[in-house]
Amino acid sequence: MNLLGSYAIGEKKQWELGVRWNLGSGFPFTQTQGFYENIDLGQSPVLIDYLTGNFNLDVILSNERNGGRLSWFHRMDVSLKRSWKFGKYSGLDAVLSVTNAYDRPNVFYVDRLTNNRVNQLPVLPSLGLTWSW
């Protein structure tokens, strides 16, 4: 769900304030059932030390594809735009915006092997110029 609002300010309406609030359900993912050591059988089975070897960790996934969901997320983006007109056909717009203005730590995914949570965008300011002719 997105709620969007904008408001023009100034005598000539050259300023525009915009606010967008976004609410969404978490991304689907296939759940982890367990882990196992993935033994490289590309080399001779006689030379592999099965008892003391350290092999790469691999994942056993659930049979139900996309059976899990991450938590709900929301964020607010704000922007301020200023417009200038240069004659009949030319203009300049300057936009200052902030994504995730209240710095909510929305989960993007969780690394299966390390169990580390990776979040979506942090507070992300940006500045842009658009010249049209």
Image (cartoon, rainbow, N blue to C red):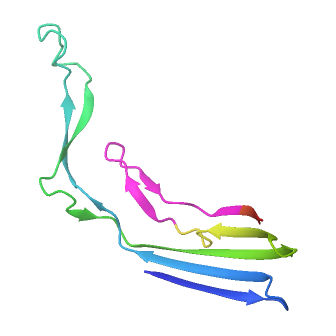
Residue appearing at x 21%, y 18% in the figure: 52
Closer to the camera in the image, 75 or 35: 75
Q: In the image, what residue occupies the spot 85% across and 92% down?
A: 11
Q: Nearer the viewer, residue 5 or 43?
A: 5
Residue 115 is a magenta residue: yes
Relative side of 92 to 28, left or right: right
* Residue 124 x %, y %: 64, 61
State left or right for residue 96 relative to residue 19: right
The correct choice, above or below, for 34 with respect to 92 in the image is: above
Extreme residue in the bottom direction: 11
Indicate the quadrant containing the C terminus: top left, top right, bottom left or bottom right.
bottom right
Image quadrant occupied by the N terminus: bottom left
Side of 116 where 65 appears, left or right = left
How many numbered discs sit on the rendered protein?
0
Q: x, y percentage for residue 78?
A: 65, 75
Residue found farthest to the front = 88
Q: Nearer the viewer, residue 58 or 21?
A: 21
| x 24%, y 63%: residue | 68
Residue at the image position 77 percent from the left and 68 percent from the top: 94
Dividing the picture into quarters, in which one does residue 79 lie? bottom right
| Left or right for 71, reference 85 | left
Rendering quarter of residue 132? bottom right
Tell me where the magenta segment starts and ends, as one range. 105-126
Which x, y percent locates residue 102? 60, 73
Q: Is residue 52 magenta?
A: no
